[in-house]
Amino acid sequence: MQVGLHALGIGDGARPEIVRAVAQAAEAHGFGRLWAGEHVVMVDAPVSHYPYSDDGRIAVPADADWLDPLIALGFAAAVTEDIGLATGVLLLAEHNPVVVAKQAATLDALSAGRFTLGVGIGWSADEFAALGVPFTGRGRRTEEYITAMRTLWREDVASFEGDFTHFRDVRVNPKPVRDRRIHVVMGGNGDTALRRAATIADGWYGFNLTAAQALERVSALAGHCAQRNRTMADLTVAVALTDAVPELLPELAEAGVTELVVVGAPPATPDEAGAWVADLARRWLKSPRS
């Protein structure tokens, strides 16, 4: 099982010198992947319930800097060589899928095939309203957009006709590096997200779960896969835990988890950020590089 780091793009982690320091230190110390999440807008008084905390409120202040994850990961790609890069997650229904297909393939090409596109349906009605995108139907929209983007990546001249997007005889280049595919990971902890992961995705990302919840969710995911004649070997499974300790790694791996994602906020200076990553690596990786 590899260990990823979800620490880029917010607050001090949005500053270029910190992105560089964290990305380079994570690569040097053996982390497998860098993750970055998305919110296009935040609001001071949200009406929507945040599904990943007990009190229903996101911990990030509304006035915090929050980088676009594709651009942030492009910056990280330019200062690293080997470490994987992933959105965790991009709120796909808020975007034009043709544009995202172009951006994702560009990032994949510039990173030499290191990019994973993690997507979610989104939880904030305020955000969808600000972007002029209907909140209702965002799940079906996300599913259709994934299919449309794969068509654009796969075909030299692509056409698609759906309920939410359509195009005819268009070319979108460059193509993704790995057989014209980008690994698409579905985020979300509920049963519907697991069903989507088992049906249309290449992986699943569970966020802010306890270890016990993660194990139950992985078991449920396996059931959804079996119903669709897929196995857990067909998917990558990444989880970010609220109670993670290194001693849990063998049990998580045995259950089918392929990546533990460590979530944190880096310190405010490059030297401190690099040391912070080194400390995390000593705890989680215990590799000679740490």
Image (spheres, rainbow, N blue to C red):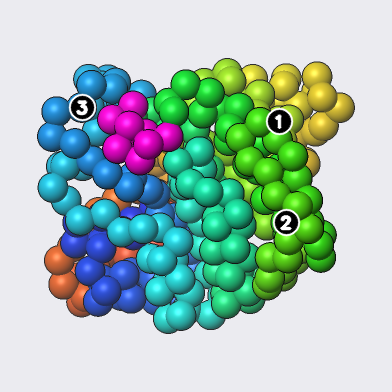
Secondary structure, magenta segment, majority class:
helix
Name the element at disc 2.
helix
Q: First in sequence, mark 1 or 3: give its number.
A: 3
Q: Nearer the viewer, mark 2 or mark 3?
A: 2
Q: Would you say 232 lies left or right of 52 here?
A: right
Residue at 37% x, 48% y is: 38
Q: CA distance from mark 2 to mark 1?
A: 22 Å
Residue at 58% x, 18% y is: 191
Q: Answer with the quarter of the image where residue 7 lies.
A: bottom left
Q: Which mark is residue 46?
A: 3
Q: First in sequence, mark 2 or 3: give its number.
A: 3
The residue that mark 1 highlights is 198
Q: Residue furthest front?
A: 168
Residue range (magenta):
125-133
- 212 is higher (above) or lower (below) than 197: above
| Residue 56: x %, y % from top left | 26, 21
> What is the tally of numbered marks visible in this picture?
3
Q: CA distance from mark 2 to mark 3?
A: 36 Å
Q: Amino acid at mark 1?
A: Ala
Name the element at disc 3.
loop
Quick one: 150 or 184, which is closer to the camera?
Answer: 150
Q: Amino acid at mark 3?
A: Pro
- 23 is higher (above) or lower (below) than 115: below
The residue that mark 2 highlights is 152
Residue 187 can be seen, yes or no: yes
The quadrant of the rendering that contains the C terminus is bottom left
Q: First in sequence, mark 2 or 1: give its number.
A: 2
Residue at 53% x, 80% y is: 81
